[in-house]
Amino acid sequence: MHLAQELVASQDHLASLPDLYYKIRQALARPELSIGELAELIANDPALSGTLLHIANSAFYGFPRRIETLSRAISLIGMEQVGDIVLAGTLAAAFHGIRPQRMDMQRFWRGSIRRALLCRQFARSLENRDSERSFIIGLLSDMGHLVMYHAVADLMGIVLEMSGPDLRELAQKEREIIGCDFSEVGAALCASWMLPASIGTVIGSQLQPALAGEFSAEAARLNLAISMAEASERGETISAACPLLDPDTPELSGVDLALLPVFAENCDAQLESVMQSLGLA
């Protein structure tokens, strides 16, 4: 039987992020950090600089005029939000070339971006200013599977053979056969990357949002995003009656279910643009 932390620790190439990401995190923690200093730091990585400008000019933000410089992008988006975009770009660049056995990476990234976009929309609909944090939570929510398909590919094959399409059933089989499920591994990965503990709590509680305590509303919104993303992957039309992974999700999340078709439409409109911006299309 495997513990989530052991699986993460066994994968050296997944257990840490590039040094530049941590340097940017440290810089963002300084109250006196200027836009110019942050732009100069990001400019050390041409690929990351390009990703930031691509996203700033994509349908993700929809700014009316083209943004040509990092400083302009940072001033419009905000430094904390840029930090979250840098994390998204770092993840995409670090793991884009990974091809685990039995894992459809195109489907994985589409699902992850779809969850991220939906979480961001939910936050914005509730006038939550930290919508980029919600984007990151959605983006990271299935990363546990990336570790598991690498670390215990044969066992994951057995899990897939014994479980159906329901994500809760899949997680149950993971716990029975491997000893932990993807949400636990995802939370352990967040801890390994030294992300805020609250993000790990939300991701670890994504299938049972009520267990997230003070972060149960965020976990419920992630749960709702997963339900919608899974339905979209099955080719279903999203409606207010979208099948839910957890019956308590609507009340906990605070999201108006009548708006789900609008959220789904907006997500579809942005999906390809964001995937291209992150180099995942």
Image (cartoon, rainbow, N blue to C red):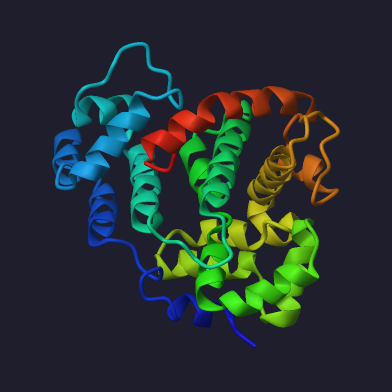
Looking at the image, is 146 positioned above or below residue 263?
Answer: below
181 left or right of 279? right
Q: Position of residue 124 (x, y in %)?
A: 57, 29
The number of numbered discs placed on residues in the rendered structure image is: 0
Looking at the image, is 211 positioned above or below residue 135?
Answer: below
Residue 229 appearing in the image: yes
Q: Position of residue 212 (x, y in %)?
A: 67, 59
Question: Could you tell me which quadrant the C terminus lies in?
Answer: top left
119 left or right of 150? right
Q: Position of residue 116 (x, y in %)?
A: 55, 42
Furthest toward the top, the residue is 64
Question: For this rendering, which residue is in front, 85 or 154?
Answer: 154
Furthest toward the bottom, the residue is 1
Question: Could you tell me which quadrant the N terminus lies in?
Answer: bottom right
Looking at the image, is 139 positioned above or below residue 171?
Answer: above
Q: Residue at x 49, y 31 (%)?
A: 272
Q: Residue at x 16, y 41 (%)?
A: 43
Q: Residue at x 69, y 42 (%)?
A: 233
235 left or right of 92? right
Question: For this rendering, which residue is in front, 169 or 213?
Answer: 169
Q: Residue at x 50, y 72 (%)?
A: 150
Among the 4 quarters of the image, the one containing residue 205: bottom right
Looking at the image, is 14 positioned above or below residue 40?
Answer: below
Q: Position of residue 274 (x, y in %)?
A: 45, 33
Residue 130 appearing in the image: no
Question: For this rendering, which residue is in front, 99 or 182?
Answer: 99
